[in-house]
Amino acid sequence: MAVTEVGTDAPGGEARKAKQPKPAPLLAADGTPLRKKLRQALMLSRMRAFALVAPLLLFILIAFVIPIFAFMVQGFYDNEYAKFMPRSTEALADWDGESEPTEEMYAAMVADLVAARDHPDRPIGRVATRVNRELSGTRSLFTSTARKAARMEAPFKDAMIKADKDWADIETWQAVKVASTAWTPAYYAASLDFKYTATGDIVRQSEDRRIHVTLFLRTLEIAFTVTVLTILLGYPVAWLMANLPLRTSNLLLILVLLPFWTSILVRTTAWIAMLQGQGVLNDVADWSGINSMIVWAELRFAELGDMLWPSVWQEIANRFDVNLAYDRLALASLCANDVNQVLNQGQGALDGLAQRAAADLTDCATEMLAIYNANGVEAAVAKARELKADAGFAGYGDERFSMIYNKTGTLIAMTHILLPFMVLPLYSVMKTIKPSYLRAAKSLGATNWVAFWRVYFPQSVPGIGAGALLVFILAIGYYITPALVGGQDGQMISNFIDFHMRRSLNWPLAAAMGGVLLIFVLFFYWLYDRIVGIDNMKLG
Amino acid sequence: MSEMLPPYATTGQKIWFWTFRGICALIFVFLITPILVVMPLSFNVEPYFSFTSGMLALESDAYSSRWYADILRNGTSWPANELLPWDGFLAWVWESVYTSAIRTIQWIIPFWDEDTTLKPNSEFWTDMWANAQWIRAIKNSFFIGICATLLSTSLGTLAAIGLSRDEMPFRRPIMAVLISPMIVPLVIIGAGMFYFFSNDFNVFNWFIEGEQPPSERFPLAYTYAGIILGHAVLGTPFVIITVTATLVGFDNSLVRASNSLGANPVTTFFKVQMPLILPGVISGALFAFITSFDEVVIMLQMATAEQRTIPRQMFSGIREQISPTILAVATILVIISVLLLTTVELLRRRSEKLRGMSPG
């Protein structure tokens, strides 16, 4: 408002103000009040800006947000049973899950089984699969009873129990009740190693079936280790580039960007070529004798540890799941692999070795095979035991470290692939830190270390945060590298989601595991937005 | 280390200086070696992933281009142990060019009557173009990549322009949603899309009344359209990030000047804004292209064997029959990425020069 009243704070001002006529509002050329006109204009430009974004937003919503949301919801929904077995579903809904199963339930089940057998889609296998997920071993129960169901007569309870005595078991009925609820928390519970029971409780899964939490923890552990490794490797490189003349640092930047632009498949293939048993790194190690040195050092170090500090050493070994026997590294080698196979599988493994070309055999395998051919299986296994007891195959000369198809391979390849995502944000932050700060700190008497730690490092923390969060977010959902070089113990949660999606066709469980993973990722994304800001994300 | 090692440095400082450089050199070696190692290995005459003693001794018969020939041969009826018939190559190129030229003319002038079916005197090359697995993968990769790039670049550029306006409402949450395809695990995206695009849940079926037989629905899973949509979604965050970065230095008074001189918004966009942000748009497009070009996970979920792209073919190659052909393809891909990287770097410099951010 352009016109303001002065001096209205006199006694009785309120009343007088109300009587006074309102000041005339400023008008635009066409007679509308300026304030309104301004609001309209602002609104229009807002709408215009939004209209530019709208097509993409709509596209992302339809092709990305809604599909993922629908998929997450699928984790709560499975009507595979209810769709084809409506009568028993209804009967089971009234059952409390604890009392003796009633005759009506048996009758409804028989009617459903008969109907399902006559159904053109032949759904009995799908129904059996659904129940089997709740209680393993029930698949054949369903398929076999369905075959007999048409000939059953009342009382159905006795008839069914006669067909298979598992029908008397309350556990079977509890599993069916859980399977018959279409909207169910069972899958999300299962993805966190819990079990949804017929009485509606959620309890811990039995000890031997808890696999998912371990898997999530392993995924977090791998993602965390990769993040730490990228910080350790990325920090010096970023520092060097930030402190070199621009011409040189641009050249070095290309060395960082080239891997960034190279296909992940190419880099993973390259690491297979580098790391495999007959690969480049092993060749170099073998040729230079480094592997023998490592094994030797490993032996001495373990002996030293055992001698000096047995309890602490044991503790460290337990903590990191390290095999304390001094053949730790050697056991991972090909030679030890052969020995272990012979120890575990006996004749089968020996026959397998005999199939291989003589040139491909390790020294251990050659020795065991020779004894196998001369004196039979028993002697060969005894030799294997002897070899294992031997000081970690030291002196065999062909120890090749298996660095691939296990967690080590996954870690190395993922670190390599994600390193540019750490270096680039670090570099862009470090470029802005003025070198004069360090000089000032030193001129005030700080040592090199103090100047770095108290002055430089705190300023580079935003870069570390940005890089670390980005790497962690990308690592936690990684699929390709673990799938190709992960072997058994390098698999991550994404690989299991894919397995349930495409192999075991357990879509609701895949959805539930994906939902849990997505929550992790979104949490870190939110954190990234809070700390770094999405706007500050830069590429190249 | 902008101050190089000063002359008064103590021995300890000298040691640390060179140790630090050494460590950094090792890290650069770690970054670049795997990519370099692929190249010589792809010329291995043996079907292994390791250097043979002949290769190390630089004997010429330990090297061969057979795995490059295999890219062209694999899937054709050409016998595996015979050399490729290079003599038919030029004839094939000529035929293809000639045929497509005639087709184009016929398309423009429908009554043009010219027999386009030349007698093939280059059977292998025709066979190769139609049937070789890797060639099909290359064609698929480029087709899907280019379509996805066009889609994501056009939508992404528009959105980036809207997002960088000051008056954009709900800027932060919308930005968060639009960038999220970059950070949501690919497996979840792939599974969600496959689930949603498969018949029962396909969004396009919502608009069809009643129960339709499956043949009349639009099953987007297992179609090029579905894959292109998926890849376009993945590419948009990169376009948005690069274009918004270019727009940060954009002087809005240029737009106002153009408007005040009487240009309409469309003219202003194409004549004023577009030329200035073009370098950013092109780098965004290249990012989107490389994202699609390098994508496996969605392909695993949504594509059939016919639709395999290069990375998808490599993925099954690594899993099923690991042969140096993969290394040959990898070498070609490295060369492509070097070219792309160079282009993007040149564009970035040009963009900075245009916006006066750097002198060089």
Image (cartoon, helix red, strand yellow):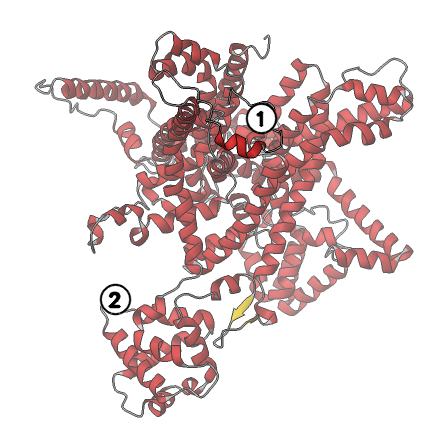
Q: Is residue A98 above or below residue B190?
A: below
Q: Which of these two is toward me, A258 or A13?
A: A13
Looking at the rendered structure, the kind of residue marked 1 is: Leu
Residues tagged by mark 2 and mark 1 found on one chain of the structure: yes
Q: Residue at x 48, y 25 (%)?
A: B164
Q: Position of residue A435 (x, y in %)?
A: 77, 19
What residue does disc 2 label? A121
Would you call the spot at circle 1 few (<14 residues within 10 Å), some (14-19), or many (20 or more)?
Answer: many
Residue A279 in sight in this render: no
Residue A423 locus on image (x, y percent): 65, 30
Residue at 42% x, 34% y: name it: B292
Tell me the SS state at disc 2: loop
Which residue lies at the image location 44% right of the left edge and 30% below the top edge? B288
Is B89 left or right of B161, judged from the image as shown?
left
Q: Nearer the viewer, residue B289 or B252?
A: B252
Chain hosting mark 2: A
Q: Helix, strand or loop at disc 1?
A: helix
Indicate the amino acid at tag 2. Answer: Asp
Residue designated by label 1: A257
**Residue A314 picture location, percent across and down:** 82, 59
Instruction: Please state which of residues A131 and A355 is positioned toward the viewer in this rendering.
Output: A131
Which of the 4 image quarters holds residue A231? Answer: top right
Callouts 2 and 1 close, C-beta under 8 Å: no
Disc 2 crowd, CA 10 A, few/some/many (<14, 14-19, 20+): few
In the displayed structure, does residue B57 sit left or right of residue A35?
Answer: right
Chain-order first, disc 2 or disc 1: 2
Q: Nearer the viewer, residue A308 or A326?
A: A308
Q: Is residue B50 left or right of residue A396?
A: left
CA distance separating discs 2 and 1: 54 Å
Can the viewer see residue A34? yes
Give the total number of marks visible in the rendering.
Answer: 2
